[in-house]
Amino acid sequence: MVYTKTGDNGTTSLVGGRRVKKYDMRVEAYGTVDELNAHIGLLTVMAKEKSEDLVIAFDVREQFESICKHLKKTQNNLFVVQTLLATEDEATYAKLPQLQLNAVEEMEGWIDAMESKLPRLKSFVVPGVSLISAQAHVARTVCRRAERAIVKLSDEEKIEEIIKKYINRTSDYMFVISRFVLFIENKPENFWSAE
């Protein structure tokens, strides 16, 4: 059954069973990562549909397929992050799947590969131009909110540095995807202007 009725009083269970208010900072942190994961899921579907478009060039298809592969790995890592954030008991925490030590460096490699093909930024980028690019920006901003919640939680609880780094780098990754998608779609970036 999907509904348990145990949350009707405004509480939820952490991994390990302790019940806390649904506005608890730990719940806010892992809940926002969950929201981020959902937005990345939508981004993945959009990129996958684009890769299946029969009228796009083969090299563009390959780029979108690569993005989808990396996004799937990111989503799996975010599930690990969510679970760790939802766990306060150290013994239980130690038994859970952990974020791999090379996860941040791997994502930096994806970022560097895309950025090497992009023109240098001279202004702020205004989200839009294409649906996929705009969705990457939505994921980026949700990721920043998740990061703020995790940093706030880390003022009260011990949070591993790799989790904070991974979430920070994920927002950078979403930003670069937003630009790279426009590049491979051959669409102009929308730069901010004070005029």
Image: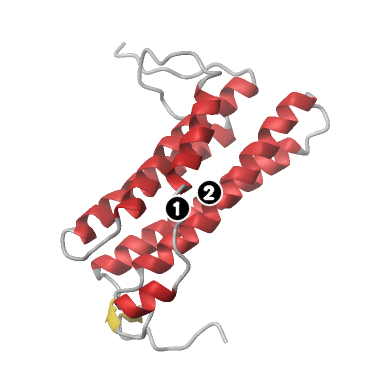
Q: Return the x and y of residue 71 as percentages of the image width and height.
A: 57, 46
Going by the numbered disc 2, the residue's amino acid type is Ile
Q: Quadrant of the C terminus?
A: top left
Q: Residues within 10 Å of mark 2 (few under 14, many from 20)?
A: many
Spatial separation of the CA atoms under disc 1 and disc 2: 6 Å
Q: Return the x and y of residue 172 as percentages of the image width and height.
A: 41, 36
Query: In screen coordinates, is 60 left or right of 109?
Result: right
Query: In screen coordinates, is 26 left or right of 178?
Result: left
Q: Quadrant of the N terminus?
A: bottom right
Q: Return the x and y of residue 131 as percentages of the image width and height.
A: 58, 35
User: As drawn, which residue projects farthest toward the left?
Assistant: 155
- The residue where tag 1 is placed is 36
Label 1 close to label 2 by CB (< 8 Å): yes
* 175 is higher (above) or lower (below) than 76: above
- The residue where tag 2 is placed is 40
Q: Residues within 10 Å of mark 1 (few under 14, many from 20)?
A: many
